[in-house]
Image (cartoon, helix red, strand yellow):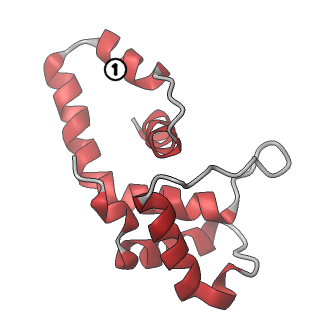
Amino acid sequence: MDFSGVYDYETLAAAVTVAKELSDPGTFLDDLDENIIKFQNDLIWKTYKISPLENGTKFSFRDIVVQASLCLTIEKDLIRLTDLIQLIGTKELFNKLLTYETDDDITKLIILFMRVFL
């Protein structure tokens, strides 16, 4: 699976549009180009950090943008992954995917997405 689309400028811009429907962007849109470029750099250099949950339950606007970018990038691949898991026919593999632990924030977002949508 190629994840370079996650930090593609157009994908991140589309993700901002999606995220605006789900959360208040606050001042994020005031300097949209700079914020998207910062996202690109953070994702490329693997320095992106997930923000603490707001009120213990709500993702920050930044995290929602990254999640939306992941969704836009891997939507078709997730359909293929689901098909592959069904072909393999093992719930054990599926359960391992859902309980996998990592310190890498990008991988954490992917796993979170998988837990919600698979």
Above or below, comparing residue 1 to residue 41 in the picture: above
Displayed quadrant of residue 80:
top left
Residue 78 seen from this side: yes
Q: Position of residue 44 (x, y in %)?
A: 40, 60
Residue in the foreground of this view, choosing between 107 and 88: 107
Image-based side of 84 in relation to 75, left or right: left
Q: Position of residue 35 (x, y in %)?
A: 58, 78
x 49%, y 78%: residue: 37
| Most foreground residue, 29 or 86 | 29
x and y percent of residue 94 in the render? 34, 20
Quick one: quadrant of the C terminus?
top left
Q: Which residue is mark 1?
A: 94
**For the point 45% across and 79% down, which residue is it?**
13
User: How many residues crowd around disc 1 within 10 Å: few (fewer than 14), some, or many (20 or more)?
Assistant: some
- Residue 17 seen from this side: no
Question: At x 70% / y 59%, what residue is drawn?
Answer: 60
Q: Residue furthest right?
A: 55
| Horizontal relation, residue 49 to residue 11: left or right | right
Q: Residue furthest left?
A: 87
- The tally of labels here is 1
Is 1 located above or below residue 38 in the figure?
A: above
Q: Secondary structure at mark 1?
A: helix
Q: Position of residue 3 (x, y in %)?
A: 30, 54
Q: Label 1 amino acid?
A: Phe
| Rendered residue at 77%/44% (across/down) | 57
